[in-house]
Amino acid sequence: MKKIIIFFAFVSLLGVFSCGDQLDLEPLDRVTTNQFYKTRTDFDGAVFASYSSIQDFWGTSTETLGERGEFWKISLAITDDVAADEVNGGSSRDIDNLLLRSNDVPFGAVYTQIYEGIYRANIVIENLDGENELTAEDKTIIGAEAKFLRAWFHFQAMKMFGTPPLALDIRTDINDQARPNATQEELYAAILADLAEAESGLPVEWDGSNTGRVTLWTAKAYIGKVNVWKKDWPAAITALEEVVNSGPYVLVPDYEQLFAYTNENNSESIFEIQYGGPFSDDNLWVFDDTHSEDFKASQGTARGNYWDAAGGAPGGKNGQWVPTQDLVDAYEAGDERLAVTVYQDGDMYYSFDGTRYEIPYDPAWSSSGYTLKKYRGTLNAVVGNSSANGQVDFNNERWFRFAEAKLLYAEALIQGGGDVGLAFDEIDDIRDRAGLGPVDRSLDPMDALMQEKRVELALEPHRYFDITRWGIGAEVFGAAWDDKYNVFPFPLTEIDRSKGLLIQNPGY
């Protein structure tokens, strides 16, 4: 899937109104819904459109809301692992200080992308039973894939907003578009039902031309993960035990190689956000599929542009977000992951802006003295991972890794009254790769689990959602914490559009 780009125009289901003889004319510059959804290629393209909404979480655009990699702000800058740089942090500084407002761009941007992805999945599901050329097997697989995506997007919405609307159909009445909050019970039921159908219908694996598409093992892993969030420990243990012991995944031996652009979709990848390139004019300032210039879209992220060092560092990047001292202090002596995750004094620094730079790292380039290295470093600050001008990175986002599945399994065992010794063994597998010895068995097992998950998944989009579900916000953030921060505010625009049907989260 990574190397396939399908540009796709959706025709409004509400119709296009005009006058006189023009009313019944077919548009000449687009494919209508009556012409589309016929072949397997059509349905594959429609499913890819739903996947592509995930790419836009990190997108940059001068149109729509003026996005600047918004998901990094609400998944990383908000945490104790990352700070908005004092000089270059810009609008991220408020979020870094837990000043969250319903009209802040990140919440509106990500909410829009989530429900765009759900809408696109629903279009696929609703067209499966129309007049088309699909075989019964095609319908099973495509329907399962679309339901996985619908579940995935709803799960992200629930983690962020708590009680977001359920959207399980397409509404065609222009006066009946608003949806109310769903309860947590309704959300879990719908998400797990979709994942169960995905598990039963998805293939064990895809051929090489479809690398990156979800499999039944992806669905099994998410059934386990969702049940961890639900605190249904027996269900979580059952699903994750199968993934850990019988699935196709193994840990990548070298932690640095895990994030190399030449090692995408590796043996540890359960769900990976696919990027491709170079298929563009190097214009960073367009989304992949929601900008008026989508035909020139970059199909990548601005990871290097936003995260590489500023303050006089070679490459002219923004240094917008920086790792914190608190994160660095969380690593044990001898933990090999630290050198892969952050740049610090004494390191060789690498960047790329059309020219590759290799120079000793200067802590003065960052207000914390540290710069993100994970997904960058010597392996990724290179021509193959970058657009010609160095603005765009094409490396995939490793969203759900086998290491996380093992840690979730360990958590379910600990919390569910299972074999704590086995839970420690799972943690030890992760520590062994990091060059560390076994975890001290005298430690509280949940404390050991939470510590290991923080450093293993550092600077990946999980920390904040772990903080909220573990209920440790006050412990992490001290007096700045308010329990309302366990969920984000619904975008004010969505509250207004719903005419009050969608109820704002308390305190916002």
Image (cartoon, helix red, strand yellow):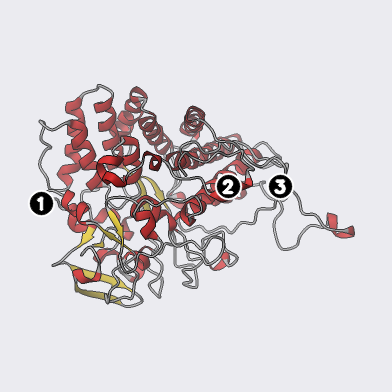
Q: Nearer the viewer, residue 395 or 420?
A: 420
Image quarter of residue 472: top left
Looking at the image, residue 62 lies above or below residue 164: below
**Residue 119, percent across and down?**
59, 45
SS type, badge 2: helix
In this rendering, position of residue 280 left or right of residue 400: right
Checking the image for residue 13, the label placed there is 3
Q: Where is residue 390 in the image (x, y as percent from the top left)?
A: 38, 72
Mark 1 in CB contact with mark 2 (< 8 angstroms): no
Q: Is residue 498 left or right of residue 144?
A: right
Q: Gap in Å between the C-alphas at discs 1 and 2? A: 48 Å
Q: Does label 3 or label 2 sit earlier along the sequence?
A: 3
In this rendering, does residue 361 appear at all? no
- The residue wearing badge 2 is 494
Q: Is label 1 in a helix, a strand or a loop?
A: loop
- Amino acid beneath label 1: Gly
> How far, Cα to Cα, is label 3 from label 2?
20 Å
Amino acid tagged 3: Leu
Camera-nearest residue between 264 and 380: 380
Question: Which residue is at a point 72% across and 45% down the rendered structure image?
Answer: 174
Along the polypeptide, which appears first: circle 3 or circle 1? 3
In this rendering, would 89 be left or right of 41?
left
Q: Which amino acid does label 2 sit on?
A: Glu
Secondary structure of residue under mark 3: loop
The residue beneath circle 1 is 334
